């Protein structure tokens, strides 16, 4: 394969048997945005929109081999990490990623249903080995609290948490405000130029996979050469459609629908 044939992006994440998050959501997002999706599987999960019933980690040598195989044959425009699961796999990714890779980190720690997806002792590896290499980090509020070491309860808190995570070495941080109460859903980007806020409608239901979809859309736009702030705005517009036209329902939990309309 050559860069003249395709624009490619790679997701390093876990498999979601329900198809709504993880690798599956990332591939659907890449396809909807005209990007050739590549994958590195870190874990297999047995889950649906309600719960994670089991998680089986791949060995780090399998993760490392996947990264190397992809990097050896494809011109990867951007990479993203989702569920890394544990310290050995986090270190394997850090060791195998090509130097200078455009990297988005979605620091997946705990599922919506409360299942831990990143071992507590792996957080230090994420902070020390991967975040300093990231072009963008995209934590939700609970993840931002862990990475920034502070309580996040307001928009000002979100901006401060973003600045603290930026100080860990990332190029930019998008703190996602979906967990914050209020009439609008506000996401905040913090970079060396300051703070950028974007807001969208808050819908009266939860959407499984929205964080994965957003970070994958951001990755896709970076793969096309878009700067981080423009990629943030484009990804924010994309995820609003994917949430508005989420699949499933009626009920409290729906599934993110990258590209919209098809499965409504």
Image: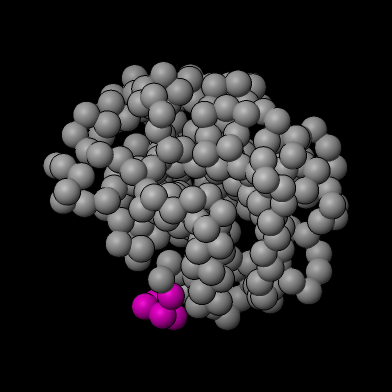
Residue found 43% across the figure and 75% down from its top:
260
Q: How is the image coloured?
A: one colour
Residue found 81% across the figure and 69% down from its top:
182
Instruction: Determine whether, in the image, residue 153 is placed left or right of residue 9.
Output: right
Which quadrant does the N terminus fall into?
top left
Residue found 84% across the figure and 52% down from its top:
156
User: Magenta region: which residues?
Assistant: 260-264
Residue 85 visible to an observer of this rendering:
no
Q: Looking at the rendering, which quadrant does residue 172 occupy?
A: top right
Closer to the camera, 132 or 58? Answer: 132
Q: Is 262 within the magenta?
A: yes
Instruction: In the rendered view, tell whether residue 39 sits above or below residue 227.
Output: above
Q: Position of residue 256 (x, y in %)?
A: 50, 66
Instruction: In the rendered view, tell whether residue 247 sits above or below residue 6.
Output: below
Closer to the camera, 254 or 192? Answer: 192
Q: Main secondary structure of the magenta part?
A: loop
Residue found 28% across the figure and 26% down from its top:
68
Closer to the camera, 102 or 119? Answer: 102
Closer to the camera, 250 or 166? Answer: 166
Residue 90 visible to an observer of this rendering:
yes
Q: Position of residue 138 (x, y in %)?
A: 60, 46
Which quadrant does the C terminus fall into?
bottom left
Q: Position of residue 146 (x, y in %)?
A: 74, 35
In this rendering, the count of numbered labels is 0
Q: Is 103 within the magenta?
A: no
Instruction: Determine whether, in the image, residue 116 is placed left or right of residue 220.
Output: right
Q: Position of residue 70 (x, y in %)?
A: 26, 34
Instruction: Determine whether, in the image, residue 256 is placed left or right of residue 73.
Output: right
């Amino acid at each position: 394969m050559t860069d003249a044939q395709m624009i490619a992006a790679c997701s390093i994440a876990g498999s979601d048997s329900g198809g709504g998050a993880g690798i599956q959501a990332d591939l659907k997002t890449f396809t909807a945005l005209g990007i050739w999706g590549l994958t590195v599987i870190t874990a297999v999960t047995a889950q649906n929109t309600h719960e994670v019933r089991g998680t089986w980690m791949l060995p780090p040598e399998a993760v490392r081999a996947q990264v190397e195989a992809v990097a050896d044959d494809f011109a990867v425009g951007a990479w993203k990490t989702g569920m890394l699961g544990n310290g050995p796999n986090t270190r394997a990714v850090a060791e195998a990623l090509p130097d200078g890779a455009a990297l988005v980190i979605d620091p997946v720690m705990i599922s919506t249903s409360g299942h831990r997806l990143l071992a507590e002792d792996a957080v230090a590896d994420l902070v020390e080995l991967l975040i300093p290499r990231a072009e963008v980090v995209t934590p939700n509020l609970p993840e931002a609290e862990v990475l920034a070491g502070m309580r996040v309860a307001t928009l000002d808190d979100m901006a401060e948490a973003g600045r603290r995570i930026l100080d860990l070495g990332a190029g930019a941080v998008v703190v996602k405000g979906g967990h914050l109460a209020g009439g609008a859903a506000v996401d905040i980007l913090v970079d060396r130029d300051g703070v950028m806020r974007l807001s969208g409608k808050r819908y009266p239901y939860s959407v499984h996979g929205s964080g994965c979809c957003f970070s994958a859309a951001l990755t896709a736009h970076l793969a096309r050469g878009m700067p981080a702030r423009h990629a943030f705005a484009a990804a924010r517009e994309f995820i609003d459609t994917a949430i508005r036209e989420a699949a499933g329902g009626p009920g409290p939990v729906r599934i993110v629908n990258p590209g919209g309309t098809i499965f409504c």
